[in-house]
């Protein structure tokens, strides 16, 4: 199982940030050719279609999607490279959450939530998910986001295939530290 996790993380790096690592390109919607991906990943980790399907099916964050005939694959969100993964513009629930590490609080309280090297800030539907995300960055801190006010002020939200809410930024005035 450990090798599958390493392989999945490598695929995430390729499909979200650095396709050139294995010499492939993504189309404008973030799709990569499955055969080319398998050949490229095989240079570092053993993989075939069966293993790739297992990674996609069992990924706890539902990071990846195949097209209908499984000839193409992409990451659902989290890109640092410019691709249009055809996200849906939707009105979010009135409240969403963002989990982060304690070490980022000072910066967030000055700048709000910014996307840094990603295309969007990621928001969660529930505190538990936000807490899980925050734990990856040390002691977790959870922010409640006043999405209702953000929408009223013309800020657009997107929703990814794996139910992550995305926004370009969250100004300080919409944040409440829990």
Image (tube, helix red, strand yellow):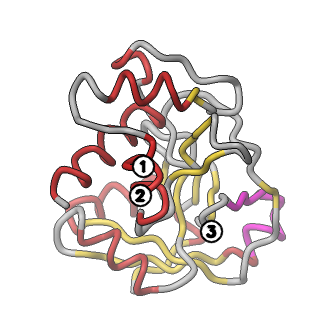
Mark 2 vs 1: CB contact within 8 A: yes
The quadrant where residue 135 appears: bottom left
Residue at left 62%, top 48%? Answer: 168
Which residue position holds label 2? 54
Quadrant of image for the C terminus: bottom left
Q: Which residue is mark 1?
A: 50
In what element is the residue under mark 1? helix
Q: Check the image and report above or below for 100 versus 73.
A: below
Residue 155 lies, in percent from the top left, at 76, 58
Q: Position of residue 14 (x, y in %)?
A: 40, 31
Compared to residue 17, the image places residue 107 above or below, namely below
Spatial CA span between label 3 and label 2: 20 Å
Q: Is residue 56 left or right of residue 74?
A: left
Residue 42 vs residue 129, the one in the foreground? 42
- Relative to residue 49, is residue 98 depicted above or below? below
> Residue 102: horizontal and vertical position, in percent?
22, 68
Neighbour class for label 1 at 10 Å: few (<14), some, many (≥20)?
A: few
- On whether residue 157 falls in the magenta region, the answer is yes
Residue drawn at (41%, 63%) of the image: 59
Quadrant placement of the N terminus: bottom left
| Secondary structure found at label 2 | helix
In the image, what residue occupies the spot 71% across and 35% down?
84
Q: CA distance from mark 1 to mark 3?
A: 25 Å
Range of the magenta residues?
Answer: 149-159
Circles 3 and 2, Cβ within 8 Å, touching? The answer is no
**Which of the numbered marks, if any, corresponds to residue 163?**
3
């Amino acid at each position: 199982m450990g090798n599958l996790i390493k392989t999945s993380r490598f695929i995430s790096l390729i499909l979200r940030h650095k396709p050139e690592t294995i010499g492939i390109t993504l189309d404008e919607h973030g799709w990569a050719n499955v055969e080319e991906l398998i050949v490229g990943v095989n240079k570092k980790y053993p993989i075939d279609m069966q293993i790739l399907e297992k990674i996609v099916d069992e990924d706890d964050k539902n990071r990846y999607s195949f097209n209908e005939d499984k000839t193409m694959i992409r990451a659902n969100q989290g890109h640092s490279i410019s691709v249009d993964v055809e996200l849906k513009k939707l009105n979010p629930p009135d409240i969403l959450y963002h989990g982060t590490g304690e070490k980022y609080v000072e910066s967030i309280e000055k700048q709000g939530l910014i996307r840094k090297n990603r295309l969007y800030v990621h928001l969660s539907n529930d505190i538990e998910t936000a807490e899980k995300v925050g734990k990856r960055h040390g002691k977790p801190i959870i922010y409640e986001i006043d999405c209702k006010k953000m929408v009223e002020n013309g800020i657009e939200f997107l929703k990814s295939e794996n139910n992550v809410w995305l926004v370009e930024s969250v100004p300080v005035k919409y944040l409440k530290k829990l």
